[in-house]
Image (tube, rainbow, N blue to C red):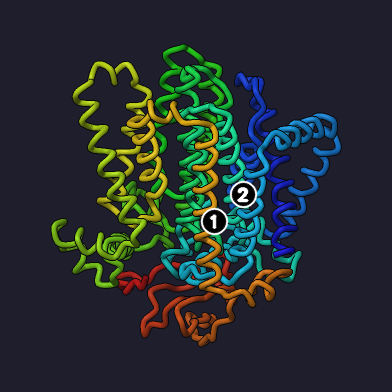
Amino acid sequence: MLIVLISWIVITFISFISGDALLELLEKKFQIQKPVHFSLVCLSGFALLSLICSWVSLFSGINEYIFLIITILCITRLIINFKSLKRKFQDYFNGLHSTPLALKLLFLIALFTTLAYSAFPSKCYDEGFYYIQNIKWNYVYPVVPGLGNLECRLAFNSSWHLLAALFSFRGISPYDFDDINGLLFIFAILYALSGANKLIKGEYRLNNILKTGLLLPGFLFYSSLMGPAADLAVTLFIWIIVILFVEKIEDGSIETADENMLLIWLFSFFLITVKLSAMPILILPVYLIWSAIRMKSWKIIAVLFPLSLIIICPWLIRNVILSGYILYPLPVLDVFHFDWKIPMTELIHLNSAIEGWARTASNNYQEVNSLPYSKWIPIWFSIKRIYDKLIIIGFILSFIYISINVIKNAKKYLLQRHYLVLFFTVSISIFLWFIKAPDLRFAYSYLIIGIIINLALIFRKKLLAFSLQRTKNIILFSGILAFGFMCVTLYMVEKPLALMSYSVAPAPYPIPVFTVIKVDGHPVYVPKEYQCWDGPLPCQTQLQERHPYHFRTNNLKDGFKAQRGYLINFIK
């Protein structure tokens, strides 16, 4: 835990300096008149660093030399801008003094719990299956042509794993680091407590309620704190984007080119490169840019459009190199015919497997996907955890209530078109999620945000009548309940003695038993339990009599090409 904490301090330094540099570069074009929250600066740094890694990965692995170059640049900027950065940190620390002691204690509980989860052995199956291998390929080689032919999920091109490769400290530290999700959650908690602090002071605004709601994802995603799963990043970034959008509505600044517009645009396009399923969130920045066009803010448009292209272009290039498709794993825009292209039949099988597993957690995905909605929905609902069922029911009831009110009071709601845009974004996101891959972890942000917004609108008058003490008690109770659940779960899974085992260093990766096979004369490592973890490259996650790929050359960095006419039996 101690070494994980040290790594977080290093990552925080690099991400803050990077994010501050980006915001300072763009502040002349945008009306950044108030200090940007510390967490948002760090998250801006994450976006910038992942962008840098995306471009660099076209020519080099994201190795320790890239990490050292970035670190040296950040230290140099600290020295050059020491006075201004010192003043900013003083402002942040002064803000901490005004935070109630109870919230400070809540943060310490969250920090300790998250550190424990980050240091303990991962319980996430996909981490051993392909996350760590993906990170290792990104560390060792530039983007590898046809890597998805070795294992289709290795072509899932998430910039979050590029960031994880940058902060894996490989080649620098003997320890195994995959704790970036834990630090992301801590940034979210800091942001949440800023909203809770304002609620306690009587600032009953929807954006403060949504900020405080960021305490909940730890309760829902506690297992994701143990590894670099992109699902947590998608949930938290979507949540923050919605908060920034609501804050613009409440400030009456939808058409103003301020820091919130910049961050919404930056985070939204960054999020697409983290996970393609986040694409519906683009509705919000597109709506903002439409407002800017109406106001003829051409200088802002001239900044935002190139920024989006700079973010998206390397991600699209990586998609094509990894899989042969522009929007992998979607079988659309099939315009390239490179020899490393993944066969369309395999792509269809992969999407069917994802859809079938999300519906009933079954490997018999062909049978599941052929079931009508009336058959698989009851199965889908029955296998959910009790609090997942409550979230689903809560969203449906609140959605129906708000929909009826929108229909009954159409004129009133048309005057609040900004909220209707938000309502539409949440609705279309839930719809696409449900028909494609209704796994709750892919939609927690939209479901809970929808519930919070709807409840806040329904009980707005009662909320305004709350006493400050009652508000404080509710916030503390909710926070203690969420982190108490995480502590109890940690106790049940790991037991107290394990806490001592990982109090200094994080748990190492499991070491699988491998069988070595030959493909085109090259050794390929096949794990006994279908999880490669940090095994040697190339690692094939399943042993087959016929191998559906070939090496393109004698060099691993030149990648793999598919054996045509072969259908892979995908295993979840």
> Against 382, is 52 above or below?
above
Q: Nearer the viewer, residue 443 or 531?
A: 443
Sequence order check, earlier mark of 1 and 2 = 2
Residue 323 appears at what percent x and percent y? 43, 58
Residue 529 appears at what percent x and percent y? 46, 82
- Where does the C terminus fall, quadrant-wise? bottom left
User: Residue, x 41% and y 35% (percent of image)?
Assistant: 282
Residue furthest top as drawn: 295
Observer able to see residue 347: no
Residue 370 appears at what percent x and percent y? 16, 63
Element on which disc 1 rests: helix
Category of crowding for the residue at label 1, using alpha-carbon neighbours closer than 10 angstroms: few (below 14), some (14–19), many (at least 20): many
Q: Is the C-beta separation of discs 1 and 2 under 8 Å?
A: yes
Residue 403 appears at what percent x and percent y? 23, 32
- Where does the N terminus fall, quadrant-wise? bottom right
User: Residue, x 31% and y 65% (percent of image)?
Assistant: 357
Residue marked by disc 1: 483
Residue marked by disc 2: 106
Element on which disc 2 rests: helix
* Number of numbered discs visible in the structure rendering: 2
Q: Hey, what amino acid is under mark 2?
A: Leu
Q: Hey, what amino acid is under mark 1?
A: Phe
Category of crowding for the residue at label 2, using alpha-carbon neighbours closer than 10 angstroms: few (below 14), some (14–19), many (at least 20): some
